[in-house]
Amino acid sequence: MGKTRELVFDRGFAYSDRGELIGHIVDGAIMLHDKAQQTMVQTGVRLPTHALNVLEHIILSHHGQPEYGAARVPSTPEAIFVSLLDNLDAKTAIALEAARRGEKAAAELRGNFTERHWALGAKVFRPNPLA
């Protein structure tokens, strides 16, 4: 959710001032709180505190570990699920980019694999198996 405020799309992707100062994790939690307040004002129905806490936890923990930007380690089944999906998405994007990049010819790499990628802990097979 917070990514919609964190990034600007004028000419490619860049960080907004708000994105640099607040970041998408905290901004996502703020957006959830604002939406819960708006819903209560419009409908008179208050989101249960327990549900709001769990939803905020999912947002605050979706990066998995503090060293990756998580405010908390995922501690509910839902938060663990979202964190793993976020990690899968990131690593898949990294692997696809590494496989598509032709920065070094296969001969230069002595084969069909990229150099070992630190985020993946592996070399990536480059040729398109369907080509």
Image (spheres, grey):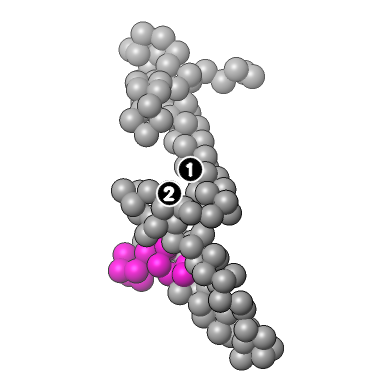
Q: Earlier in the sequence, mark 1 or mark 2?
A: 2
Residue segment shown in magenta: 17-29
Q: Which kind of residue does numbered mark 2 sit on?
A: Gly
Mark 1: secondary structure:
helix
Judged left or right of residue 15, residue 31 is: right
User: Which residue sits at x=58%, y=85%?
Assistant: 38
Residue in the foreground of this view, choosing between 49 and 23: 49
How busy is the neighbourhood of tag 1: few (under 14 within 10 Å), some, or many (20 plus)?
Answer: some
Instruction: Name above or below for residue 123 compared with residue 21.
Output: above
Residue 43 visible, this orientation = yes
Tally the marks.
2
Of marks 1 and 2, the one in the foreground: 2
Relative side of 77 to 93, left or right: right
Q: Secondary structure at mark 2?
A: loop
Q: CA distance from mark 1 to mark 2?
A: 8 Å
Amino acid type assigned to the residue bearing label 1 in the image: Asn
Query: Residues at badges 1 and 2 in contact (C-beta under 8 Å)?
Result: yes
Which image quadrant: the C terminus?
A: top right
Percent position (x, y) of residue 81? 57, 48
Q: Residue 89 appears at what percent x and percent y? A: 52, 42
Q: Which residue is mark 1?
A: 87
Assess whether residue 85 is covered by the magenta stretch.
no
